[in-house]
Image: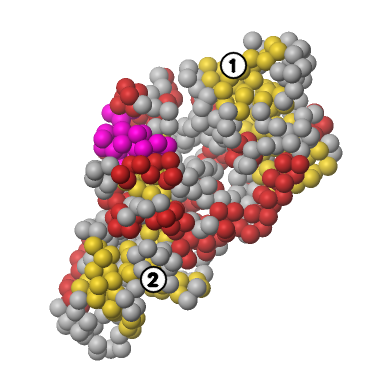
Amino acid sequence: MVPLTRSGSLGYEAPMEKMKDSKILSEVALGNVPPDLAIVHGTLFNAHTGEFISGQSIWIKGKRIAYVGPDHAFNRKGGVTVIDVAGMVLLPGLIDGHTHLSTSLSGIDEFISYVIPGGLTTVIAETVELATIVGKDGIDYFIKGFEGQPIRFYYTAPPLCGLTPVEESMVPSNDKLLPLLKDPRCVGLGEIYWGNLLLKGKQGRRVRELSRLALGLGKRVEGHTAGASGKKLQAYTSFGPSSCHEPITAEEVLERLRLGYWVMVRQGSIRKELPRIQGIFQRQIDFRRLILSTDGVDPKGLIEEGYLDAALRTALQLGVPPALAYQMVTINVAEHFRLDHLIGSLSPGKMADIVVIPSRQEFKPQLVLIGGKTVFKDGKLTIRPRKVNCPKYMLRTVKVEGYSLPSPPKEGKVRVMESVTDLVTRESIVDLDDAEASQDIIMALALDRLHSTQAFMGFLKGFGLKQGAFGSTMSWDSPDLIVLGCDGVSVKTAIARLKETGGGVVHAIGHEIVSELPAPICGVLSLHSVERVREEMRQIEETLSNAGVQGERPILTINTLSTVAIPHLRITHHGYVRLKDRKVLSYRV
């Protein structure tokens, strides 16, 4: 295992340590000291120039590169390990610049085991999910979990933006987040929803101050501009966000590039944008601020497609020039996060993160090195990720004692959330006395699972569920337990089971549990393997499909009903929230 410590075995060196390393590296480059490892006869991808240069060698000392070039006559004293790659392509290790590890639903160690074979060597991770439930302890869970792992983790401190102040009840004060922003492993402030940054009152002031603190420390502020354009986008941009992963058309990508954003094109389980934005590659513009990222990959995607490697292969298949595709997952990311002095290219002084592939068009890693150590070879991992544990109290966060189930009206006009897509809803008014208009309406219950017994019963139209209830504790940006149901008995069964398992998702019909995915770590993460979670997801999708649900991603649908990130009408335990004005609304018209 390659250790990761704050003092820097994977790259967090103090200035004096770096100076000492530099002197040794220079002696290796001059031929006075032998390298530890020499990779010879490779076709090197130069991330700075976009060239593929044949007949190249890389000499490595410790965890860093000492020499890159055509000279194979290195100092051989002391038993140098030599790897002859016979013309294969040498790439810098891949960097995912924006991801949510929680999307995999399993532990950090499980995630690592699946992404190393795809050439991923560095992760910039968001840390928001558990903090919504347990505050700073949830952030610390990830940070501590990143230590001692075989791949390099950096992270962003989460701004924790909720629909209303009520959803931000567990948010640490800015003073408590400040030490995180000062951590060298923290590259900045995580994605801030544009609507929250522009909000009046305490909610907006809190995140604007947090943004100011991050920028004052020389850290990045990550953007989230979904739905913003024109004057709103420019007003948001004035507060200093440097990137955005939300553009879904070539025109939106171009608009943000022109404003100076690093644009992260998503290709993961939340959205796959490459086919929709591929027209941008026909433009005669500078692409050095274009990045390819995942935004997270679920268990099915990890097993059946891959991770950032799958996104990269898609880019190549769509005709993106290989040099540009590789820059989008290496040097462009490193430059954005001001890490290019360490990673992102194969050049002297940089970390020896190297991926060997058969050819520039065939991205299929044969060998992966991180910090000069082999972590993947001959189709197998050569390391063992460290298992990450959590405090026992984080396994008991579904506290729903004493709640009462609101009685939904059976007649008259009501306000409902109507599904437009798997993720997007709109506000609609439906007359329950109109049998045709109300035939696809089900209950949508939001229940505070942390602090109170408060609950709100609304309605959802267009989900398709015709039997039972579907519940989840994985709500984005909210501490609420959400249940979509056709009858009260099934709803109560789902709630009781989620409390019993510590959270996750469940499909109940009457008193019976027909499928479930337990996720007891803050009600968000499973304790099981990626393979088992994939099977549990498959069973839930199957039983929901049999019960009438039409959407392909029902778990994602229910989990996003509470987030600020997606328009237009959302739900909390105190009412609907209309995003355009943040008004809290009842079902009553």
Q: Residue at x 16, y 82 (%)?
A: 32
Q: Which residue is drawn at 37% across and 63% down?
A: 361
Residue 140 drawn in magenta: no
| Count of numbered circles in the view | 2
Identify residue for label 2. Answer: 358
Q: Which of 237 and 17 is in front in this view?
A: 237
Residue 59 in view of the camera: no
Picture quadrant of residue 507: top right
The crowding category of the residue bearing disc 1, from other C-alpha atoms within 10 Å (few below 14, some 14 to 19, many at least 20), is some
Amino acid tagged 1 = Leu
Mark 2 to mark 1 CA distance (whole Å): 58 Å
x, y (%) of residue 509? 81, 38
Residue 249 drawn in magenta: yes
State which tag comes first along the sequence, 2 or 1. 2
Q: In this view, does 566 lie to the left or right of 253?
A: right
Q: What element carries label 1?
A: strand
The crowding category of the residue bearing disc 2, from other C-alpha atoms within 10 Å (few below 14, some 14 to 19, many at least 20), is some
Residue 585 is labelled as: 1
Residue 506 versus residue 378 in the image, above or below: above
Q: Which residue is drawn at 57% across and 23% down?
A: 426
Q: Nearer the viewer, residue 280 or 34?
A: 280
Amino acid tagged 2 = Pro
Which residues, given as a range, are shown in magenta? 236-262
x, y (%) of residue 432? 74, 15
Q: What element carries label 2?
A: loop
Q: Which of 422 and 455 is in front in this view?
A: 422
Q: Which residue is drawn at 49% across and 32% down?
A: 565
x, y (%) of residue 467? 79, 34
Residue 279 versus residue 122 in the image, above or below: above
